Amino acid sequence: MVGFDSIIPPGRTGKLTPKVNIKNSHGGQIRKSVTITSNAANSPSLNIFIGANIKPVIGISTSFLRVVTGKDQKGEKIVLTTAKSDLKIEQVEFKSGPVGGPAASPAWQSDLPAFVTYAMVRRPQANADGLYEYELELSLSGGDGQRRYGEFVIKTNHPSKGLLSLRGSLEPPPPEPGK
């Protein structure tokens, strides 16, 4: 969407105010263009390019998370990046559903609880961008031995981003060698 002065006299300047909706942006580089059409004889059409680097409120190091279930399995680690120096995780849960993966989990699995345990550690210093990095480890002891797809919902104490949602799956442990 662009706001602009509708009539600009010859030889004068006008104001162009582009607005970009970044609501569902996950951060990173964006590039947009604006086409200006006028009654100028020498160049009736002009393209202007606008670039920006969008910094997310909380950056997440991955877009899909696989957690292997079982007592002896190591947790899966992701990195959260934010300007908040005292980020806390209040709750992590896994909700089964047809959010991702090659096939949705069977309907009866959606009622089974998935008790996700977590531990988070903040790296001591802010990075070069002034952001703090937190290493979050997620694990699941037990499980039903079935692959389940859905989303991990992470509740934080961040005033602007209280909930993080991350597509993922719960995977059964790999078979033991020789069995």
Image (cartoon, grey):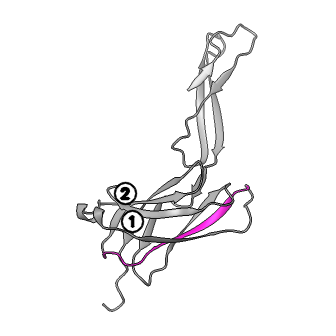
Q: Nearer the viewer, residue 102 or 86?
A: 86
Q: Please identify the quarter of the rendering in which residue 34 is found.
A: top right
Q: Is residue 167 above or below residue 67?
A: above
Q: How many marks?
A: 2
Q: Amino acid at mark 1?
A: Ser
Q: Secondary structure at mark 1?
A: strand
Q: Is residue 136 above or below residue 48?
A: below
Residue type indicated by callout 2: Gly
Residue interval drawn in magenta:
130-145
Q: How busy is the neighbourhood of tag 2: few (under 14 within 10 Å), some, or many (20 plus)?
A: some
Q: Secondary structure at mark 2?
A: loop
Q: Which mark is residue 8?
A: none
Q: Residue at x 30, y 67 (%)?
A: 112
Residue at the spot 75% in from the left edge and 58% down from the top edge: 128
Q: 177 and 141: which one is in front? A: 141
Outermost top residue: 9
Residue 175 horizontal/vertical position (percent): 34, 84
Q: What label sits on residue 100 in the rendered view?
A: 2
**Quarter of the image containing the C terminus?**
bottom left
Are the residues flagged by discs 1 and 2 in contact, CB closer than 8 Å?
yes
Quadrant of image for the N terminus: top right
Tell me residue 111's x, y (percent). 29, 63
The residue wearing badge 1 is: 169
Estimate how packed mark 1 is, as few (under 14), some (14 to 19) or many (20 or more) residues with alpha carbons within 10 Å: many
